[in-house]
Amino acid sequence: MNKMDLIAAVAAQADMPKAKAAEAVEAVLGAIGKALTGGEEVRLVGFGTFAITQRKASKGRDPRTGAEIDIAATTSVRFKAGKSLKDSLGHD
């Protein structure tokens, strides 16, 4: 599912025009992005949690040459599925 599919699904489920659904989806995604950028965790009970994670700089090896390389520290977003979402997928 891509963003346009999500907008269409929201429009159909909420019985609203696609333009309004697009505004709503954009607003939700924008709010999540802004919160994460500000260092906040976004917890959607029953669905899951979005959080920022920091990975330390480390050493690695170039698989082609075997030479040691420096891997820079990075910041990324982690999503952890909530219990209701996990249960709906039928996995343990």
Image: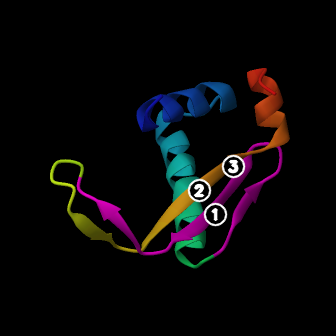
Reading the image, the residue beneath label 2 is: 78
Total label count? 3
Q: Nearer the viewer, residue 19 or 86?
A: 86
- The reply to whether residue 27 is in sight is no
In-image side of 15 versus 29 (left or right)? right
Residue 80 image label: 3
Q: Are marks 1 and 2 in contact (CB under 8 Å)?
A: yes
Residue 84 locus on image (x, y percent): 84, 35
Q: Earlier in the sequence, mark 1 or mark 2?
A: 1
Residue 59 among those drawn in magenta: yes
Q: Are marks 1 and 3 in contact (CB under 8 Å)?
A: yes
Amino acid type, label 2? Arg
Residue 28 locus on image (x, y percent): 59, 55
Residue 2 locus on image (x, y percent): 43, 33
Bin the neighbour count of mark 1 within 10 Å (Cα to Cα): few under 14, some 14-19, many 20 and up.
some
- The reply to whether residue 44 is in sight is yes
Q: Earlier in the sequence, mark 1 or mark 3?
A: 1
Q: Residue furthest top?
A: 90
What distance separates the C-alpha of mark 1 from that of mark 3?
Answer: 8 Å
Q: Main secondary structure of the magenta part?
A: strand
Reading the image, the residue beneath label 1 is: 51
Rendered position, 11 above or below 51: above
Q: Which secondary structure lies at badge 1?
A: strand
> Dividing the picture into quarters, in which one does residue 35 lie?
bottom right
Residue 49 locus on image (x, y percent): 71, 55
Bin the neighbour count of mark 3 within 10 Å (Cα to Cα): few under 14, some 14-19, many 20 and up.
few
In-image side of 59 versus 41 (left or right)? left
Q: Nearer the viewer, residue 59 or 1?
A: 59
What distance separates the C-alpha of mark 3 from that of mark 2?
Answer: 7 Å
Q: Residue furthest front?
A: 66
Q: Nearer the viewer, residue 31 or 71?
A: 71
